[in-house]
Image: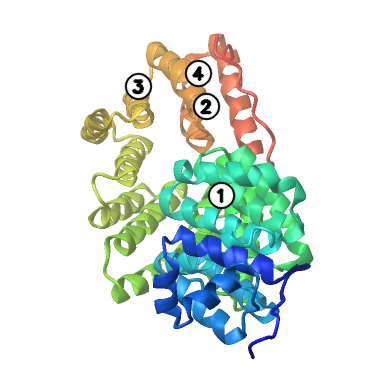
Amino acid sequence: MRGVIIKAKLYGVLLDDIQLGAMLRTIRKSKKLSLEKFATLTHISRNILGAIECGEMPCSPEQLFSIKRALGIEFLPLFEHERSNFMDFLFNFNNEIQEGNFKTAEDLSAKLSVIKYLPDDKELSTLFSIFNCRFVLSTSGVEAAKKLLDDLDKSCESFDSLQRYHYSYVKGTYNLIDRNSDEALNFYLEAYGLSKRFSGKNINLYYNISSSYIGKSNIARSTTFLEEAYDLILSGHTTNLEIYIYNQLGINYIKLGVLQRAKKMLLKALKLARKNYDAVRNDKNKEIIGMILYNFGLLFRKAKNGFKALDLFDMSIPYIDKRSTLYLDVVYQKAQTRIDMDDKVSCIELINEGLQLSKEREDETYTILFKSLDSFKHLNDDTAKYLSEKTLPYLFKINYEFTVLDFTGALRRYYIRRGSGFKDKANQMLNIMHMVQSKIHDGSVIEWENDSFD
C-alpha cells in the first residue's frame, strides 16, 4: 500500500501528510524517543520515518499501525471508523464512572487521553475533558477537579447540546459535593431539560436532583424525582443506587408522614442490604444495614412507638462504626426518644455520651444538639430562651428544619402551659412549625428572622 496518501477524516478536518507527520514527530519527541530508537520499535527505517515526519513521504496503513503501537497511541482516532470506536469507548468510560467501577475507568482514562494530540477534534476532546473531570471529581474530590472545571468553564459557551448536558451534570455534582445545593440544583435541572433531547431517562440524574432538593429541605420535590427513579427500577432499569433510592424514599416518606410507604421502602432497602452483605462482607455493606435499621427507628419514633424505636436504634449499633456521624445520630435519637417517653432520667447518660463524643470530634452541630437536649429535658424560661435564641436559628442555618419540629412543638406546649402571658411566643412556635411543614411539603421558602424570639 506504499504510495497511498492517507487522509484521515477528523470531524470535518482533513489531516494531510504534512499534518500527520508533524503530529507524529511531536508525539515522538514528547516521549523522548530518538529516530534510531523509534526505527527499532516500528521496524521501519530511520530515513523513511524521517521522511514521513517531514511530510515528504506518504504513510501506509500498515506503517501507521506500527507507528501508533510504538508510540502507545493505538486509541488515537485517525480514521472515521476509529473515531466511531473512540466515541463508544468515551461513553463506556462515563458509564464505568457512573457505576463506580473506578479501576476500569482509570484504565480507560489513560487510553483515551491520547485525544489531546488531536485538539482540533472538539467533539471528542471536549467530551473526554468533561468525563475525565467527572472521574477526578468522583475519585479525588472537588479541589482536584477545580482546575479541570475552570478550564471547561472557559469554553462552555461553545458546547453543543450533548456536551452541555454532560458539563451541567458534572457542574451539578461538583456543587452537590461542595454542599452548594442551590447551584447543584440549577445545573442538574439544566441537564434534566437537555436529557429529554437525546439521552432519555437517567436514574442517577433523578437521584442527584432529589439530593439537591433535600439540601434545600424541599422534601416533596425530592420525593417526586426519587419516585421517577423508583418507577424506572420497576420497569427494569438497573443502577448501583437502587438501595439508596429505597432508603431515601423511606426517609422522605417519614418526613412527609406517609408511614406505610416509608415502611415498604425501608423493607426493600433492608432486604437488598442484607443480600449484598451476605455476598460481600465489607464495612460499607455492613454500615448500610445499620443506616437502614436506624431509619426504621426514626419511622417508629414518628409513629410514637418509643419502645420499638429504641429496640431498632439498639439493633443498628453493632453495624455502625462508633467513630462515624451516624453513631452520633443514633445516640441523639435515642436520647430524644427517651424525652418523648418522658423518661428524662434515662436520657441523661445518652446526652452525656453525646456531649463527650461531640467534644472529642470538635463537632459543632452535635455539641449544640446535645446541649439543646440537655435544656430540653427540663424546660424553664432560661432553657426555653437558649432553645429559641441559639438552637433554632442554628438549625435553620444548617438546613436541619426537620429537627426544628422537635423543639418548636415542645416549646409551644411549654408556652401554652405558662399561660396567657406567653401566648405570643406559643403562636410564634406554631407559625414556625407551619413554615417548616410548608417547606417540607411544597417548597415554600422559610425566611428566618433573628428577632423572632425577642
Crowdedness near tag 2: few (<14), some (14–19) or many (≥20) residues, C-alpha within 10 Å: few
Q: Under tag 4, what secondary structure?
A: helix
Which quadrant, please, contains the C terminus? top right
Mark 3, residue position: 375
* Amino acid under disc 1: Thr
Quadrant in which residue 224 is drawn: bottom right
**Discs 3/2, front:** 2
* Amino acid under disc 3: Ser
* Amino acid under disc 4: Tyr
**Discs 4/1, front:** 1
Q: CA distance from mark 2 to mark 1?
A: 22 Å
From the viewer's perspective, tell me whether residue 9 is left or right of residue 385: right
Mark 1, residue position: 173
Quadrant in which residue 280 is drawn: bottom left
Instruction: Identify whether 64 is placed above or below 330.
Output: below
Residue drawn at x 34%, y 54% as measured from the top left: 308
Q: CA distance from mark 3 to mark 4?
A: 15 Å
Point out the tag, 2 or 4, that comes first from the N-terminus.
2
Point out the tag, 1 or 3, that comes first from the N-terminus.
1
Mark 4, residue position: 415
Q: Position of residue 56 (x, y in %)?
A: 65, 72
Q: Under tag 1, what secondary structure?
A: helix
Mark 2, residue position: 397
- The numbered mark at residue 396 is none
